[in-house]
Amino acid sequence: MLMIVVACSGDHISPGKDLYVLQKPTNFPEPRYTFENNRITKEGIELGRALFYDPILSSDSSIACANCHQQVVAFGDPVHRFSKGVGDRDGIRNAPALQNLAFQSHFFWDGGVTHLDFTPINAITSELEMAENLSSVVKKLQRSKTYPKKFEKAFGGNNVTSQKLFFSLSQFMAMLISADSRYDRYVRNEGEVLTSVELEGMKLFRVKCATCHASDLFTDGSFRNNGLDVTFKPDSGRARITELIGDRGKFKVPSLRNVELTAPYMHDGRFRTLTQVLNHYAQGVIHSETLDPTLNQNESLGIALTEEEKSKIISFVKTLTDKTLTSDKRFSNPFLK
Amino acid sequence: MLTLFFFLLLLGSCSEPEIHDGPGTLTLHFDNVVGDANLKLNTTNTPYINSKSEAYKITTLRYYVSSIKIKNDDGSVYTDELRSDGSAGYYLVNESDADSHDIVLENVPKGNYSEVTFTVGIDANQLNQGAQTGALDPVHGLFWSWNSGYIFMQVEGESPASTEAGHVFQYHVGGYKDVAGSTSQANNVKTLTLGFNGDVAPVEHGHEPEVHIIYDVDKFFNGPGSTVTFTANANRHSPKSCVDIAGNISSAFTVDHVHAN
């Protein structure tokens, strides 16, 4: 009887057999992703992983997600300030690291996408990235020798749809959890010891940085102008989405997890080193209408930091490096065996 | 063999019950016209004339219909099932796809129906539930990935009067929310209720009435919201820029007649 009901009500997703329960790290907030609509399965993750590493998603089969999101650097782009799309086109922003995405509510530097499922659309359809259209991607996948079978295993039915494509990529991306750094093992009392310099750095960090880089996600998810520029003509950031003058020059506060690996820094990748970043906060903050108030207190710009304090903070943020994420075989290129 | 067996089982399970009091089917047929003429896409000339005396042709006409309710003479209302991921209850009427002109409501309880209510527009708040399918599948090219939402009334064509490149016009009506201070967001979603002009659509097993709904492009260009000229602002993409023209949507739909069948 159940079969009959299902058969009559159209094209339903039936998740693969191997259900996977995503374990929330104990020091993390609750996830935001709608797992109830997209149950994670081993088959779904495997499909998402293949798609993530397959240039079939781009118009000329030259660019995969993984081109600009490389595992070895927490799924960021270590080489390019502005990542390269098809035909060697320059993007307009630095590719962000991909980690702990199931715990975020806004995506991209301007937060213009509010659900993880929709994030691939922008990369696939942007002329500067994969320059492809969705119906063409779906057709290519349907025609391929291998994908229809993988889609069937992951979601049932022999047809490829964009929904299944996005669901599988979300399953893979949701799995990219970084919660096994030395810092994590220290705060969870798992026997890790931080050095005295790292601990002093942590104390300084909590006073001077954690207003924005808050919680164990090391971001509060807000949009702020951190004093990089006076005018915002080339990229107005959050205001591109909200069209509010008051949002000009604001960008999403990035997580600092794996920050040791994710150079270059800032939305436009203008800083190559962590020292440059801290020098910016100590001496380089520029005033503008929308400058974050936390960087303009007591009539002084930026964050007061001595050289020694900068060095300690850098020691601390390096404890956020998570080799488990960057070496996990489940997330590596499945086409290289 | 197993497949065949399953297919037969499917057919069997979906056929209607053999009783006359059982539910039936009601079809909403959308007929797109321009004034007195049936709409023809991509004509070689510009056969239509708007109320500003500007000649034009239409190259694309698509719109979303959803949240359909039909009212029975006894006061009860049948509500078409709506699933927020787009897998049911959302319909994309596309002039160039004849099949899409018929919205077939199945398993409608027996009764005499005399009024239909539907929404032109997509309340994209549902997008917080994730990837969409069916009529809402982004492959249709009507999904805005930044600032997520849908174009739900797409009217494109050409007019010698248009000052845009290639003399084109593109009215992409979308927008489901008013945002204070925003220069682009607006709520252009329209919900319409249309009576059957004294007719009834008698639904029962064996009778499959069809309600013939006309969408008049001429009225989309000339209604209570605005009288459109192609000489200015003929490419409109942001919700705010379409507020006036969206005010014409409701009056562009009328019920023409009912086939009792």
Image (cartoon, grey):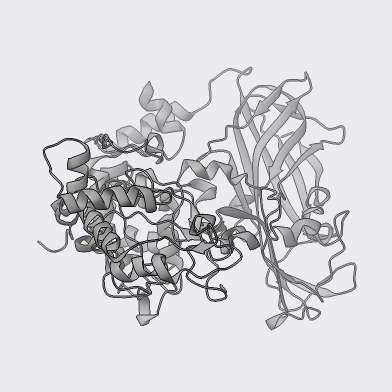
Q: Give the position of the N terminus of chain A as an image quadrant.
A: top left
Q: As drawn, is B116 to the left or to the right of B4?
A: right
Q: As drawn, is B8 to the left or to the right of B182?
A: left
Residue A103 picture quarter? top left
- Total of numbered circles in the picture? 0
In the image shown, does A207 or B44 lie closer to the viewer? A207
Image coordinates for residue A277, horizontal then vertical, percent: 35, 67
In the image shown, does A301 or A107 lie closer to the viewer? A301
Does residue A243 show up?
Answer: no
In the image shown, does A330 or A269 lie closer to the viewer? A269
Residue drawn at (55%, 73%) of the image: A230
Image coordinates for residue A298, horizontal then vertical, percent: 53, 57
In the image shown, does A244 or A279 lie closer to the viewer? A279
Does residue B137 show up?
Answer: yes
Q: As drawn, is A123 to the left or to the right of A56?
A: right
Image coordinates for residue B258, horizontal then vertical, percent: 78, 38
Q: As drawn, is A111 to the left or to the right of B258?
A: left
Image coordinates for residue A168, horizontal then vertical, percent: 32, 49
Vertical arrangement, residue B91 with respect to residue B226, above or below: above
Q: Give the position of the C terminus of chain A as an image quadrant.
A: bottom left
Vertical arrangement, residue A212 with respect to residue B16, above or below: below
Vertical arrangement, residue A103 with respect to residue B17, above or below: below
